[in-house]
Image (cartoon, grey):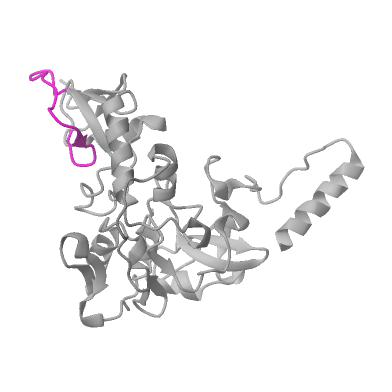
């Protein structure tokens, strides 16, 4: 007898281990039917259940109890049952509810994408484009906060924060001296440090990578460039503190940013130390592997190639081949 649990998501069947959540079951199928997630992070224990963007409809509970669940459920927190049937994109109720969730997230979040460093790799920006409404019904004044520095390398712009708790879980689980968290309740809740302490531990920079919006940003990269004008490359080094596997972001021949490598769902595969992130910004410090795979739907993929030496567009006409090489050399310097 198989120990696997079989369920159906949007008409597609999948078998998963018992205890798997609906969200991770959908990720095993992949594609568009995977619910979006703003607060869930597979590497962080206890994450999920806060943003409600991953709501789905369970039209059949299980083989033993086929009754549907009376309300929409958060797929990142709901475990699967044998015979369960789930509706995501096939449910108008889910689509409408997700639209309302996006509207709620944008109540206080400012639409300052043109000046935000997270633009181009912002989960909320993608979510708003895919599921958001064209306007808002909110008529009251948005809550605003002053920008503060939490350490010499990280700036917090609380006005943009959606309280996903990712940065808190990251600091709590990969360091032994977390000094920041959620202060206040309700509409006064905010991310802050305790008694104005600075975040100085060697893995503090990872709170930048896990933030889905532009609330926590790299002060060494702020306003330096737009991500779609850079070229991300996978690289590694022998680091005594972390695994040393990173993504280098090039502008011409200069490394202007170093981040942890992220998977298809925008989650960091291995957390990196501050030495790799902030102090190793020379090509000589790294072993270059290959261009970072970029989704074709991402603006970062603009003018990128799958090989470090791109093939000429026109292969027969020598004049056009030379012109193409000159153009590529020119764009590398920009």
Q: Nearer the viewer, residue 37 or 254?
A: 37
78 left or right, relative to 121: left
Query: Image point 67% across, 66% down: which residue?
Result: 253
Residue 299, given in percent of the width and then of the height, sits at 56, 47
Above or below 72: residue 164: below
Q: Nearer the viewer, residue 217 or 264?
A: 217
Q: Quadrant of residue 135?
A: top left
Region in magenta: 60-79
Q: Quadrant of residue 177?
A: bottom left
Q: Nearer the viewer, residue 244 or 299?
A: 299
Above or below 12: residue 152: below
Residue 268 is covered by the magenta coloring: no
| Residue ranking furthest to the left | 64
Q: Quadrant of residue 232?
A: bottom right
| Residue ranking furthest to the front | 139
240 left or right, relative to 190: right
Q: Is residue 71 visible?
A: yes
Query: Image point 28% across, 31% down: which residue?
Result: 94
* Quadrant of the drawing holding the C terminus: bottom right
Q: Main secondary structure of the magenta part?
A: loop
Residue 202, given in percent of the width and then of the height, sits at 34, 74
Q: How many marks?
A: 0
Query: Image point 35% across, 34% down: which residue?
Result: 34
Residue 217, given in percent of the width and then of the height, sits at 42, 67
Q: Is residue 264 visible?
A: no
45 left or right, relative to 147: left
Query: Image point 31% across, 19% down: which residue?
Result: 11
């Amino acid at each position: 007898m198989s120990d696997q649990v079989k369920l159906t998501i949007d008409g597609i069947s999948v078998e998963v281990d018992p205890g798997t959540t609906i969200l991770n079951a959908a990720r095993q199928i992949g594609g568009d039917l995977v619910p979006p997630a703003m607060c869930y992070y597979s590497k962080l224990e206890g994450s999920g259940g806060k943003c409600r963007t991953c709501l789905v409809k369970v039209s059949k509970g299980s083989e033993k109890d086929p009754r549907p669940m009376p309300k929409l459920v958060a797929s990142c927190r709901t475990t699967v049952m044998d015979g369960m049937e789930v509706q995501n994109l096939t449910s108008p109720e889910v689509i409408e509810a997700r639209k309302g969730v996006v509207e709620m997230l944008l109540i206080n979040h400012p639409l300052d994408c043109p000046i935000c460093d997270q633009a181009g790799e912002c989960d909320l920006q993608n979510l708003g484009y895919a599921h958001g409404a064209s306007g808002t019904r909110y008529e009251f004044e948005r809550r605003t906060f002053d920008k503060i520095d939490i350490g010499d390398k990280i700036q917090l712009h609380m006005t943009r924060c959606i309280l996903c708790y990712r940065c808190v879980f990251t600091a709590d689980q990969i360091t032994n001296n977390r000094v920041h968290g959620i202060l206040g309740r309700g509409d006064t809740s905010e991310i802050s440090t305790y008694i104005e302490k600075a975040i100085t531990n060697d893995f503090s920079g990872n709170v930048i990578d896990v933030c889905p919006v532009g609330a926590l940003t790299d002060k060494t990269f702020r306003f330096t460039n737009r991500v779609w004008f850079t070229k991300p490359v996978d690289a590694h080094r022998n680091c005594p503190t972390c695994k040393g596997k990173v993504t280098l972001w090039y502008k011409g021949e200069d490394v202007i940013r170093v981040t942890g490598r992220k998977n298809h769902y925008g989650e960091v595969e291995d957390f990196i130390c501050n030495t790799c992130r902030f102090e190793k910004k020379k090509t000589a410090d790294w072993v270059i592997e290959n261009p970072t795979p970029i989704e074709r739907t991402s603006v970062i993929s603009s003018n990128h190639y799958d090989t470090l030496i791109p093939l000429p567009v026109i292969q027969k006409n020598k004049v056009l081949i030379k012109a193409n090489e000159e153009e590529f050399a020119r764009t590398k310097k920009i």
